[in-house]
Image (spheres, rainbow, N blue to C red):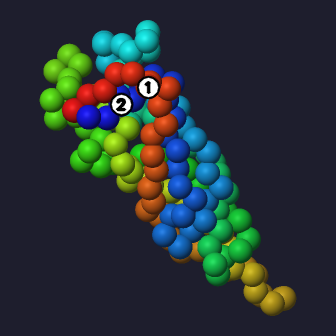
Amino acid sequence: MDFIVIDGDTAEFEKAFGDATVEVQSATMIGSGHGSVAGYPMCIDGDEGKMKPVGPVSYTTKTHTIAGQGLLTIDSLASDQLATQTTCGGTAVILVGSKFNAKFTVVAPAMQPQSPPATPTPDNNTEYDGFGTFSTQNDGVSGE
């Protein structure tokens, strides 16, 4: 049993995305379930993909120290974040669970400084994988 994620809860992203360190921001979940908890719609399977990308946010790597920018999204939920028995309109509800898989998509690459007159070298990675967790205001209704 774990708490059900509801409308207005936040997705909190970790700073480490592989070799990238991201200046993270949280994202607000929007529940589309017809059932509610304390008047807020429940978040159901698929709502994580409807969350607006977070950003742009800054990032650097150990070698690319001139900040670049990118967007944060939820890539997929962990197996313990989708209820197997609790549904809303026949669709599994999202649970707080452990950590979801997150993706950081580069929109402006970080740069590696070079000695003048050479120009900085851009980061060749277009995305980085990381993790995040849900923070809920629901402290009373659980699902499984």
- Residue 111 shows up from this direction: yes
Question: In the drawing, does residue 15 fall left or right of residue 1?
Answer: right
Residue displayed at 38% across by 38% down: 96
Q: State the image quarter where residue 20 is shown.
A: bottom right
Q: Relative to 51, say whether 79 is above or below.
A: below
**According to the image, label 2 marks what residue?**
3
Q: In what element is the residue under mark 2?
A: strand
**Where is the N terminus found, in terms of image quarters?**
top left
List the single residue furthest toward the right: 116
103 or 79: nearer the eye? Answer: 79
Disc number at residue 98?
none
Q: Residues within 10 Å of mark 2 (few under 14, many from 20)?
A: many
Q: How far separated are the C-alphas under marks 2 and 1?
A: 7 Å
124 or 16: nearer the eye? Answer: 16
Q: In what element is the residue under mark 1?
A: loop
Disc number at residue 139?
1
Question: In the drawing, does residue 32 fall left or right of residue 125?
Answer: left
Residue displayed at 71% across by 74% down: 65
- Contact between labelled residues 1 and 2, with CB atoms less than 8 Å apart: yes
Identified by mark 1, the residue type is Asp
Please state the horizontal and vertical placement of residue 73, each as a whole percent of the image. Answer: 47, 47
Q: Relative to 117, say whether 4 is above or below.
A: above
Please state the horizontal and vertical placement of residue 34, each as a whole percent of the image. Answer: 31, 12
Q: State the image quarter where residue 107 is shown.
A: bottom right
